[in-house]
Image (spheres, rainbow, N blue to C red):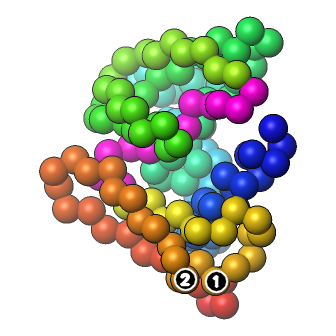
Amino acid sequence: MVRYFTEQKCRMMPYLYREAARANEAGTPMMRAMMLEFPDDPACDYLDRQYMLGDAVMVAPVFSEAGDVQFYLPQGRWTHLWRNDEVQGSRWHKQQHDFLSLPVYVRDNTLLALGNNSQKPDYAWHEGTGIPAFPSGRRARSDLRSACG
């Protein structure tokens, strides 16, 4: 279980590093309350069991032993990061997860940089980085930061 999620984190390093650099520049935390990212959605004001990881990824940790998770997704189409199934926002979702799954959804109109190395976090991200698109029909833009600056 730990190995699986560590490998996922290593693959996400290009995105995580970019978000860490943005947090350093703007002062906005990488892990942030939903209301910071969606201030016009009143349902986000009281969400305390899920968070945004950067500006594009929503994470809802599993707190129950049974694996039951309830979470809210704001307006738009959201795609599960690892399973690629799509769900609509502006509503609550209830799912069941096991030890190797977790609600991790990417919002539409996102280009998410994912690395090709799942064994270590410090590697040349520009070599073999994939950028899956989570389209919405609008133009999307992203940047990739180098660990060297």
Q: Residues within 10 Å of mark 1 (few under 14, many from 20)?
A: some
> Residue 129: horizontal and vertical position, in percent?
51, 73
Q: Residue at x 42, y 28 (%)?
A: 73
Q: Is residue 102 magenta?
A: yes
Q: Position of residue 117 (x, y in %)?
A: 66, 68
* Position of the C terminus by quadrant: bottom right
SS class of the residue under badge 1?
A: loop
Q: Secondary structure at mark 2?
A: loop
Residue to which mark 1 is pinned: 124
Q: Is residue 86 magenta?
A: no
Q: CA distance from mark 2 to mark 1?
A: 6 Å
Numbered badge on residue 74: none
The image shows residue 2 at horizontal and vertical percentages of 83, 43
User: What type is the residue that disc 2 sits on?
Assistant: Glu
Q: Is residue 8 above or below residue 130?
A: above
Residue position marked by numbered label 2 in the rendering: 127
Give the side of residue 111 with respect to residue 101, left or right: left
Residue 120 in the image: x percent, y percent?
77, 69
Q: Of all residues shown, which one is farthest toward the bottom?
A: 148
What range is drawn magenta here? Answer: 99-110
Residue at horizontal 52%, vertical 77%?
Answer: 128
Q: Nearer the viewer, residue 126 or 53?
A: 126
> Looking at the image, do the residues carrying marks 2 and 1 touch, with CB atoms under 8 Å apart?
yes
- Would you say residue 79 is visible in this rendering? yes
- Amino acid carrying label 1: it is Ala
